[in-house]
Amino acid sequence: MTAQIISGNELAKKIREDIAKRAAALAEKGVVPGLAVILVGNDPASTVYVRNKENASVKNGIRSIMERYPEDFTEEALLERIRVLNEDPSVHGILVQLPLPKHIDTRKVIDAIAPEKDMDCFSVFNTGMLMIGEPRIKPCTPFGVMKMLESVNYPIRGARAVIVGASNIVGKPMSMLLLQAGATVTICNSKTRDLGFQTRQADILIAASGVRHIIKADMVKPGAVVIDVGIGRGEDGKLYGDVDFENVKEVAGYISPVPGGVGPMTITMLLSNAVDAAEKAQKASQQ
Ligand code: GUN
């Protein structure tokens, strides 16, 4: 039987309708959610991501504060911009697009963002809160994946989840969200022996390695839910994920496509985090 497709496009559309309503309700109270996005340099992929974030913000009632700086922008100048945005009450969320140029200390920059404005949940503080099971902000991509699992009412409690990829942006925070939801979690990395043995145990398989089509049909347990976080462009110009979609869809119970899967969910959860932050700031100002 062919797997049910989990469409990130459709789910993102539904969630964005709710976000737009919440942003409009805030605007009526005089608070327009503000999201600052900082891009340093001219990395082509980052330029596209940032433009997509800006467009999605504006479409859903969030004010986008776009700051673009040249490749040779200094770390001190960037830290100063973050200090100013931290203090600005009309800015509820801040995102520094990664990667930053090599002369800038990424950790120092991310940790300079006020914790309540750290929309990516990349800071040491927010990562730690996530680790102890008390997240104040959820990291966008893993949060989007959880919404995709919830959208098909997949029973996470007690399920075996296997994550392929141990990055700080996806694999590690994903493991924390799944663990908190009651899954038994395995994180695989590039040194994992017999990857197929691990992935075949998975009721929930999250592919986030960045290796094109690393997940083949014979690596998937029949009926499993397979979420593909990978995205890369082939020489043919097409987008590819980590999962050999055409063959895996004949084995899996549920599968997310690339494109149109996790990608639109990541931006949606960024907008959700920005509106959450604005709601919290609005409530705090009433006390
Ligand atoms: N670069 C690649 N993915 C991301 C992301 O989710 N957030 C930021 N800030 N930079 C990225």
Image: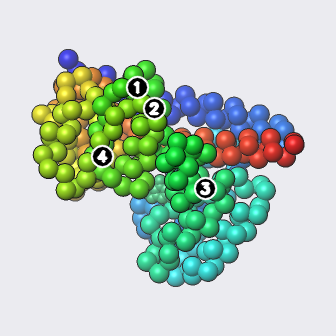
| Mark-to-mark CA distance, 1 and 3 | 29 Å
Q: Residue 118 carries which label?
A: 3
Labelled pair 2, 1 in contact (Cβ < 8 Å): yes
Of the image marks 1 and 3, the number of the one nearer the N terminus: 3
67 displayed left or right of 252: right
Dot 4 falls on a residue whose secondary structure is strand
Q: Residue at x 61, y 45 (%)?
A: 136
Q: Where is residue 210 in the image (x, y as percent from the top left)?
A: 28, 53
255 displayed left or right of 45: left
Circle 1: is it few (<14), some (14-19), or many (20+) Cα within 10 Å? few
Of the image marks 2 and 3, the number of the one nearer the N terminus: 3
Between residues 214 and 72, which one lies in front from this camera angle? 214
Of the image marks 1 and 4, the number of the one nearer the N terminus: 1
Marks counted in the figure total 4
Q: Which corner quadrant of the image does residue 250 belong to?
A: top left
Q: Which corner quadrant of the image does residue 73 belong to?
A: bottom right
Of the image marks 2 and 4, the number of the one nearer the N terminus: 2
Dot 2 falls on a residue whose secondary structure is loop
Circle 3: is it few (<14), some (14-19), or many (20+) Cα within 10 Å? many
Residue that carries the numbered disc 4 in the rendered image = 187
Q: Residue 181 carries which label?
A: 2
Task: Tell me the amino acid under the disc marked 2.
Answer: Ala
Looking at the rendered image, the disc whose residue lies closer to the viewer, 1 or 3, is 1
Q: Position of residue 70 (x, y in %)?
A: 54, 77
Of the image marks 2 and 1, the number of the one nearer the N terminus: 1
Q: Is residue 261 above or below residue 87?
A: above
Circle 2: is it few (<14), some (14-19), or many (20+) Cα within 10 Å? some
Q: Which residue is drawn at 81% across and 45% down?
A: 284
Q: Is residue 159 above or below residue 178?
A: above
Q: Which residue is drawn at 30% across and 46% down?
A: 187
Q: Position of residue 186 (x, y in %)?
A: 29, 42
| Mark-to-mark CA distance, 2 and 1 | 6 Å
